Amino acid sequence: MSQEIELKLSLPAKALAALRRHALVAGAQKLGNAATLDNTYYDTADLALKARKVAVRTRRQGRVWLQTVKCAAQSTGGLSQRPEWEQPFSGAFDFSAVDDPAAARLLARHEAALVPVFTTRFRRETRLYCPAPGVEILLMIDQGEILAGERSTPICELELELQAGRATDLLELACTLSHSLPLVPSDLSKAERGYRLFLDQPLKPVRSEPSSLTPQMNLVDAFRELAYSALRQWQANAAGAAVCNAPEFIHQLRVALRRLRSLLRLFGPALPPGFVEEWNEHLRDTANRFGEARDLDVLYEELLAPVVPDGLADGEGLPRLLAVAREARDKARVDAACNLDAADQGRLMLALSLALHRLPSNNLIGAADLTTFARLQLGRLRKKARRRFEASASLIPTRLHALRIALKQLRYGIEFFAPLFPARQVARYQEALARAQNTLGFLTDVDVARGRLENWADDDEALRAAAAFIAGWHAPRYARLRRRTLQEVKPLLWGRTPWRT
């Protein structure tokens, strides 16, 4: 068994010429001529191998046939490490070399039922890059397609495979190349893309992963683990937003960036000087590119679309105001798509991945107890929320919004540290936090919407009447929630908590 360590980077076909001309690529040793690779992936009719994240592939290159078995591993920022077994293929499968017990049993059980599922065919150019003694990296440029029945999807990517050296050597090379090339890290292998094509599964918005912390982790490892998780969410939703205009991709992308910023603040005491400030600025600026699109989606879908005139709104003011809102929302979506610059996003993702790999630790950080640290930081977030609560007694909208932000940071904190505390108490506390945050979110959305609608209406009497009708339509719920919101929040900030039971 060998361990394949690679970094997969996608790029548009029009950028291939620039990639080949890049000094680092052009100067790398060329390993033979470009070759066409024909690959067939096998599974059972009910995709038993896919369910266990095992891939079986045969590859023909000229007259040479190879059989490959791979077990999937988690990929972050395009960087993956997975076990691989490769050997000559003579027309019949031979899994005797697979020394992973679970994979060997799975293959033995289903060997007779394996059938072709999809194929890939691409042209590969291979070069060897050796920037320093002890560092060897294969640069493989692949261009072709994945085929599953009548469906197909293109392949255009650069794979960096580590032959000797460290994983950071791959990331350093990728970061250097990304300064002048539109490279985007990709966590989807050709096999995963093939299965998606076979099953006709479109990309879907990706929500945050459950925390996988353990009490034995040191602070830097815990931060890195959580940051990788948020990076995967960011990357997956950026990829989805690039091919689909569903607003949830942008929303979940912004959630990932917010979670990363919360992590930076939460683990600041364990991070190098300047790290928090630098990355908070990068992530904030990136998130701000998409804020208008998300705000207008919420305004239209949650506050305007549900309004039912019931004969109480006369004239053409309400339809006109809705049309203005739709136009503003659609323009914001177009602007967000333009701001979703693949090269810029890819560059930042790669830089963050490298920065996470390089994070130093020390004896003090290594000796710190993660659960104790979590209690201290959650207590700090709760005290901050208490101060915001006390400032909100007047129910001034801006202060309620500040309270909502403090509760959101507390909710992210308890989500990050959830595995360290009793699961049932954590779940109840999270549910209560989410309810309070949603209540405050509705109040903020209505306050913001009122200002936007008034600006759109300006001096147009019909539009002003429509704006007033919409505000009035939401007024009963707004008044009810506004009266009870602080009562809903107070027990969360002064009652028992999962980390202090």
Image (cartoon, rainbow, N blue to C red):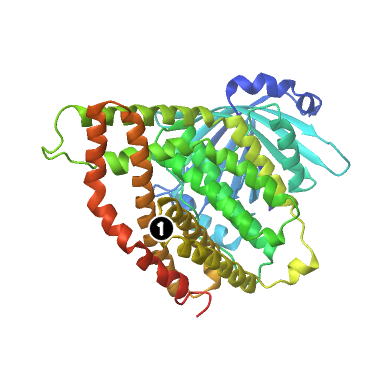
**For residue 45, side relative to residue 145 (left or right):** left
Q: In this view, does 436 lie above or below 141?
A: below
* Residue drawn at x 43%, y 74% as measured from the top left: 424
Name the residue furthest bottom.
Answer: 501
Frontmost residue, 131 versus 276: 276
Can residue 86 be seen? no
Assess disc 1: are there few (<14), some (14-19) or many (≥20) residues with their C-alpha within 10 Å of its C-alpha: many
Q: Disc 1 residue type?
A: Gln
* Residue 130 in the image: above or below residue 265: above
214, 365: nearer the viewer: 365
Point out residue 105 in the picture as x, y percentages from the top left corner.
Answer: 53, 61
Q: Residue furthest left?
A: 311
Left or right position of 404 against 70: left
Q: Name the residue under label 1.
A: 437
* Image mark count: 1
Q: Is residue 76 visible?
A: yes
Q: How far across and how far down the image is residue 390, in percent?
A: 47, 65
Dot 1 falls on a residue whose secondary structure is helix
Which of the 4 quarters of the picture holds residue 14? top right
